[in-house]
Amino acid sequence: MKPPKNGHLFTIILTGLSGAGKSVALNALEDIGFFCVDNLPTSLIRSFVDLCQKTPSITKIALGVDIRERKFLTNFAETISSLKKIQKVEIIFLEAKKEILIRRFKETRRPHPLGAQDLKRALNREGRQLSGIRQLADRIIDTSSLSPHDLRKTISKLYVREKTMPLSVTLISFGYKYGIPAEADLLFDVRFLPNPNFIEELKPLTGMTAKVKDFVFKQKDSVHFLEKLYSLLDFVIPLYMQEGRSYLIIGIGCTGGRHRSPALAEEVKKFLRGKKVAVSVIHRDI
């Protein structure tokens, strides 16, 4: 079921067994444009939805509810029934094999909401208590064999329309003398190129000026570097998009971040604009 195209509010109720991946799924929904709230008390769901309906900018919401909200069990069916009378609502129930859930709890060392002393007993109890809600679900997703990346991809494919959200790429030009940008996913060091800083006429200028750009791109190594970088980006960007990645940050660094890296970042921006990605540039050290 795709979100409605007529602008009416579309609501997803995300629930299921503890450890089955609700947080990952909720983050995936948020990344594709859903307004998400986790662990909202059942008694407040209707009021929250009514408020969202009065907010034009909100057209789709996702609510994470689980066993932590005790009244969730008694009021859930009634609340969902009332919502379905006024809007489109879909329930996703996440589950996994018991041995997988036990392994996940041991790996994260987090207690089960129904008790940490006897994990198997807590899981059995939770399964029984949620069995009625499972029967109401529109989608049941078994995450036993899914990695977090796989689950994100599954959720995205279900609720992204044919025209998917473009990958957002941010290019950061920077100077190594001021430190590497910690947020960068990919880093490219271009200090091997001749430095305009040692040319008196070019030193006070930046890589944004025509004179510096001409100097940088007259170097054969600059051209070869861009050819190889473009080839790499042509390879990895579709893979990042396939993975469900919503953004990518690429750092291009030279010594001071004023000449070579800004010029190259601007050139890469032109290339990426033809690849159906949203691209922006930050010249950190200019």
Image (cartoon, rainbow, N blue to C red):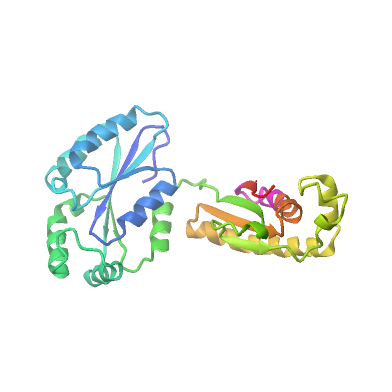
Can I make out residue 109 in this image? yes
Q: Nearer the viewer, residue 267 or 20?
A: 267
In the displayed structure, 47 sits above or below 42; it is above
Image-quadrant location for residue 175: bottom right
Residue 179 pos. (x, y %)? 61, 59
Q: Quadrant of residue 44?
A: top left
Magenta-tinted stretch:
268-279
Where in the figure is residue 193, as x and y percent of width and height? Answer: 79, 63
Q: In the depicted view, which residue is nearer to us: 137 or 194?
A: 194
Rendered residue at 39%/54% (across/down): 155
Q: Would you identify the image quadrant in which residue 220 lies? A: bottom right
Residue at 80% x, 59% y is 195
Question: What residue is shown at x 21% (from left), y 40% (from top)?
Answer: 80
The location of residue 87, given as percent across then percent down, is 29, 34
Give the farthest residue toward the top. 54
Q: Where's residue 10, x and y in %? A: 34, 38
Residue 158 in view in this figure = no
Q: Is residue 61 left or right of residue 248?
A: left
Q: Nearer the viewer, residue 122 or 172?
A: 172
Q: Is residue 224 magenta?
A: no
Decide which of 48, 154 is in the foreground and name it.
48
Considering only vertical position in the picture, is 14 above or below 81? below
Left or right of 121 in this view: 57: right
- Marks counted in the figure total 0
